[in-house]
Amino acid sequence: KDWLIEVRLSAAACRTLGVMPCLTVDDALALPTNLCEEVADVHEDAVSIGVLALQGGYHEHMVMLSQLGCSVHEIRQLSDLQRPLDGLVIPGGESTTMGHLARRLGLLKPLRQFVESGKPVLGTCAGLIFLADEVEGQKQGGQDLVGGLDVTVQRNFFGSQVDSFETELELSFVPERKVHTLFIRAPVILRAGPAVEVLAHVLLPAQADAREQRVPVAVQQGHVLGLAFHPELTKDACWHEYFARLVRKCACK
């Protein structure tokens, strides 16, 4: 009997594979078990980047970094963090859930140690929240944080899911054009410490009782990069290129 299974791949993964999301069992078994590691295997000297894969949109990060020549690996349990890694990505998703899972799996302390090690770390949306030293708007009872980024972040700053939006950002390292950006139930950075560099702002429209306001949405503190948006959901790889350069630079030291 020809069983049909539903393979839930992201749009980015389907485009990369050139397949439709609904596959037969034989078709699905013919696919590589990890597309990203298969792609990266051709690069013998590729830097090794782990992507926290407990929850959220980790796969799109993996595909994009693989296409840039990085060797990428899912981080799901303690043993995954014990492999040699040059960098780490903490994706978007739900930061409270991510924290609960990390605690239950014994990953919180090792993740903090990785951030403290000086190896590059990228956090996007929920990942930014997870890396922040201080978070406002937490759910009742608070949430577990990795920390290491000297910022105060406001969760769901723009509102609920229906208040998500797209815009164009000006970036210092891409001076020739604006970069298309997606904000999905996004946080913002309310405070940035003295060692934190702001890389991008969003302009908030003027209100009846306030003027226009620029709020930080992308920051860097040494080896730690925090973004309030989802660069992995666009076709523009400039943020992943920026992070990959940082990882390669640190790996060469």
Image: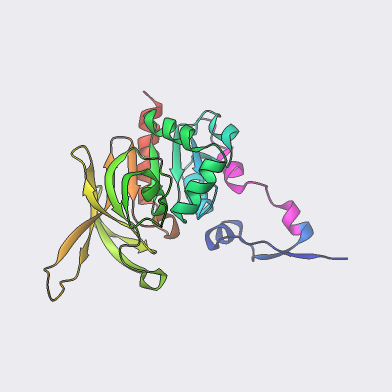
* Residue at left offset 50%, top offset 53%: 97
Whether residue 47 appears in this view of the structure is: no
- Which quadrant, please, contains the N terminus? bottom right
Which span of residues is magenta-colored?
27-44
The quarter of the picture where residue 158 lies is bottom left
In the image, is residue 184 above or below residue 131? Answer: below
* Residue at left offset 52%, top offset 41%: 103
- Pick whichever, 19 or 25, lies toward us: 25
- Pick whichever, 224 or 70, lies toward us: 224
Where residue 188 sits in the image (x, y, percent)? 29, 56
Where residue 20 sits in the image (x, y, percent)? 64, 66
Residue farthest to the right? 1
Q: Is residue 251 left or right of residue 42?
A: left
Where residue 244 sits in the image (x, y, percent)? 40, 40
| Residue 20 belongs to magenta span | no
Q: How many marks?
A: 0
- What colour scheme governs how the chains and residues are painted in the rendered image of this protein? rainbow
- Pick whichever, 47 or 54, lies toward us: 54
Whether residue 146 appears in this view of the structure is: yes
Residue farthest to the front? 141
- Pick whichever, 99 or 91, lies toward us: 99
- Which quadrant, please, contains the C terminus? top left
Q: Is residue 107 left or right of residue 112?
A: right
| Residue 36 belongs to magenta span | yes
The quarter of the picture where residue 234 lies is bottom left
Residue farthest to the bottom? 208
In the image, is residue 186 above or below residue 72? Answer: below
Where residue 44 sits in the image (x, y, percent)? 54, 31
* Residue at left offset 37%, top offset 69%: 164
